[in-house]
Image (cartoon, rainbow, N blue to C red):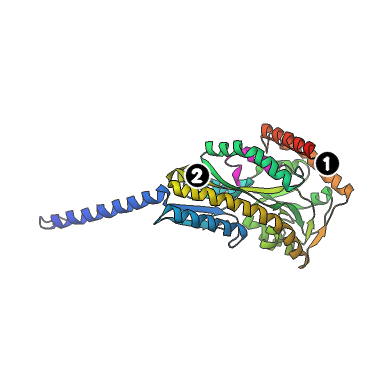
């Protein structure tokens, strides 16, 4: 055992004081980060995409308002995992926010699934906007009660079916292996119950899986199919608006409460503008992406009225299975009533 001489004791005491000071300094710095000085946002959106650029603008406004020492970090390309992973990371403080589709948002509040998980229900973006605006105040309150602040609502286009082989009828797809979100077990069960074969994967696994034959059909927006190059391996697209991809930018209430009032105002204002930009431009990109892929060999298959009826019949068969399982029954019924009223008013 080593002995400490009496002359060394003051030096050791000084060293301990310095070390304690350093530790306290680190603790203060950590508390500063926790107190709204750092905002880390995750998303599946590709780097430099429309969604990533809008998040950058939101971040710059927040950083300027929050003040010196604040840091804003975006993790694009699913680098923080799938959407269910990002929802979990927000809960444990590894992320302060995320731009999520309904797949991730329903991990926080299940009723949001009504905007995305009801196939062939919405006939236009006007209908999507109408229902979302009607649901929005109550929906944002539900998210707040769960510990999350909604900053912006967006969407990413209509889901179309991309496949290796040409297909136009519901029965054509029963022979195929479908990509399915890994976090949506209920959807997979429903698909299996009506004769389809879902293969649960994360978004980052789609391209290698379709290239190797693990899957041969992908429900995706045209923009995603173009950006990910999925269409090169699955060059057949069914021209049917199966469902809208709806999403939102959320931050944790803890992170929100730790921000300065100026930073909150900047985040709310720029977030709202970003949502509007995303909705407007994403809808334009649907047709632009389809045209770009057609020039590179994509074959678009438009169903006949008879084939479209088969798809609508399939959707009608799905609704009783979705109600109460993928979408809470109360919200399902509310959406149906809102659409009925909207269409009656249009007529």
**Left-right relation of 148 to 187:** left
Location of residue 293 (image quadrant): bottom right
Circle 2 sits on which residue?
A: 252
Q: Quadrant of the C terminus?
A: top right
Q: In the image, what residue occupies the spot 73% across and 61% down?
A: 288
Coordinates of residue 32 in the picture (x, y in percent):
37, 50
Quick one: label 2, few (<14), some, or many (20+) residues within 10 Å?
many
Return the residue nearer the eye: 342 or 312. Answer: 342
Q: In the image, what residue occupies the spot 62% across and 38% down?
A: 110
Q: What element carries label 2?
A: strand
Coordinates of residue 295 in the picture (x, y in percent):
77, 67
Circle 1 sits on which residue?
A: 313
Q: What stretch is highlighted in magenta?
A: 104-118
Compared with residue 133, is residue 18 higher up or lower down, i.e. above or below? below
Q: Is mark 1 on a helix, strand or loop?
A: helix
Number of numbered discs overlaid on the protein picture: 2
Q: In which quarter of the image is the N terminus?
A: bottom left
Q: Residue furthest right?
A: 306
Between circles 1 and 2, the one closer to the viewer is: 2
Check contact, mark 1 vs mark 2: CB within 8 A. Answer: no
The answer to whether any part of residue 202 appears in the image is no
Coordinates of residue 116 in the picture (x, y in percent):
69, 44
């Amino acid at each position: 055992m080593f002995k400490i001489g009496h002359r060394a004791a003051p030096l050791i005491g000084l060293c301990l004081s310095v070390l304690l000071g350093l530790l306290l300094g680190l603790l203060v710095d950590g508390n500063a980060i926790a107190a709204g000085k750092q905002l880390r946002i995750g998303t599946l959106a590709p780097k430099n995409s429309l969604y990533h650029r809008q998040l950058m603008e939101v971040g710059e406004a927040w950083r300027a308002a929050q003040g010196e020492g604040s840091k804003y970090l975006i993790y694009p390309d699913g680098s923080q995992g799938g959407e269910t992973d990002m929802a979990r990371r927000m809960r444990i403080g590894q992320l302060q926010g995320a731009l999520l589709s309904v797949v991730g948002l329903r991990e926080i509040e299940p009723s949001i699934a009504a905007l995305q998980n009801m196939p062939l229900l919405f006939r236009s973006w006007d209908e999507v906007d109408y229902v979302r605006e009607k649901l929005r105040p109550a929906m944002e309150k539900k998210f707040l009660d769960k510990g999350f602040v909604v900053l912006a609502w967006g969407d990413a286009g209509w889901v179309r079916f991309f496949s290796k082989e040409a297909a136009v009828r519901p029965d054509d797809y029963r022979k195929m292996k479908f990509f399915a979100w890994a976090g949506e077990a209920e959807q997979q069960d429903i698909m299996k119950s009506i004769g389809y074969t879902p293969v649960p994967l994360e978004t980052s696994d789609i391209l290698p899986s379709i290239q190797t034959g693990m899957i041969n059909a992908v429900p995706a927006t045209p923009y995603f199919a173009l950006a990910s190059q999925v269409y090169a391996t699955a060059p057949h697209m069914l021209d049917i608006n199966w469902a809208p991809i709806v999403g939102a930018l959320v931050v944790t209430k803890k992170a929100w409460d730790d921000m300065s009032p100026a930073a909150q105002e900047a985040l709310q204002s720029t977030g709202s503008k970003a949502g509007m930009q995303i909705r407007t431009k994403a809808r334009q990109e649907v047709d632009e992406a389809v045209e770009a892929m057609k020039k590179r060999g994509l074959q678009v298959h438009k169903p006949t009225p008879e084939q479209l009826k088969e798809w609508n019949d399939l959707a009608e068969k799905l609704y009783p299975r979705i109600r109460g399982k993928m979408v809470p029954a109360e919200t399902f019924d509310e959406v149906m009533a809102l659409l009925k009223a909207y269409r009656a008013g249009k007529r």
